[in-house]
Image (tube, rainbow, N blue to C red):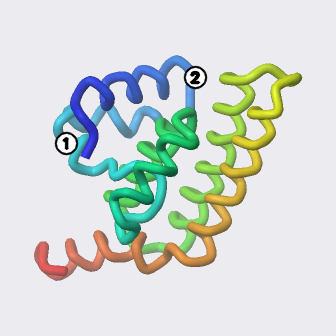
Amino acid sequence: MEGIDEIRRLRRACEDMELENRELLAKYTDEQLADMFNGIGPEGFPGWLRAALDALHPSLKPVAMIHDVEWSESDGRRETFDESNERFRRNGIKVACESFGWWRPRRYKVMWDAVKFARICQTFGFGAFYAPYKAKMNGGQS
């Protein structure tokens, strides 16, 4: 769980870069977002691994926050899952372009990793996307 100051910073970054689906964040308090956002990587990853990914790609944290909130609101539909992962890819590329000049190799590393993370989510993530929906349908029970 991120601190409230970091959540506020990420929320501002989403607005400043005009990331897709940033409007979704307005429905939640900073405290609620802190509970939903687990950083880059799936909840099943150990905390140290997510912390390492966050440290390697701090520019992708706003993208991951939107993605985590989308998955928290899961409707269990494959179409919504696909859209969320594609949005992660597009937002990640946008963040890379906004954060790093064309001459900086870091720009292309962040772009590549955003695409790679979106593909990993697409390939292996449906169970994690479906879980919040299933819990809602079971009256809050997992």
- Residue depicted at x 70% and y 59%: 116
- Badge 1 local density, few (<14 within 10 Å), some, or many (20+)? some
Q: Quadrant of residue 56?
A: top right
Residue 98 shown left or right of residue 85 in the figure: right
Does dot 2 land on a helix, a strand or a loop?
loop
Count the marks: 2
Residue 37 visible in the displayed image? yes
The kind of residue on which mark 1 rests is Gln
Please, is residue 76 above or below residue 103 in the view? below
- Element assignment for label 1: helix
In this view, the residue in front, 101 or 30, is 101
Query: Where is 108 relative to 13, above or below?
Result: below
Residue 74 or 51: which is nearer the viewer?
A: 51
Give the labeled residue for mark 1: 32
Residue 119, given in percent of the width and then of the height, sits at 67, 65
Instruction: Provide the residue designation for mark 2.
Output: 17
Q: Position of residue 96 (x, y in %)?
A: 70, 32
Outermost residue, right direction? 103
Residue at the image point whose x is 70% and y is 41% from the top:
110
Give the percent coordinates (x, y) of residue 73: 33, 58
Front one among 4 and 73: 4
Instruction: Tell whether label 2 touches label 1 (CB within 8 Å).
Output: no
The spot of residue 69 in percent (x, y) is 36, 50
Q: Residues within 10 Å of mark 2 (few under 14, many from 20)?
A: some
Q: Distance between the Cα atoms at labels 1 and 2?
A: 22 Å
Taking the spot 40% from the left edge, 67% from the top edge, the residue there is 45
- Which residue is painted at 19% across and 80% down in the image? 142
| Residue 75, numbered label | none
Labels 1 and 2: the sequence-earlier one: 2
Whether residue 21 is visible to the viewer of this picture, yes or no, is no
Q: Is residue 81 left or right of residue 9?
A: right
Which amino acid, by three-letter code, is at mark 2? Met
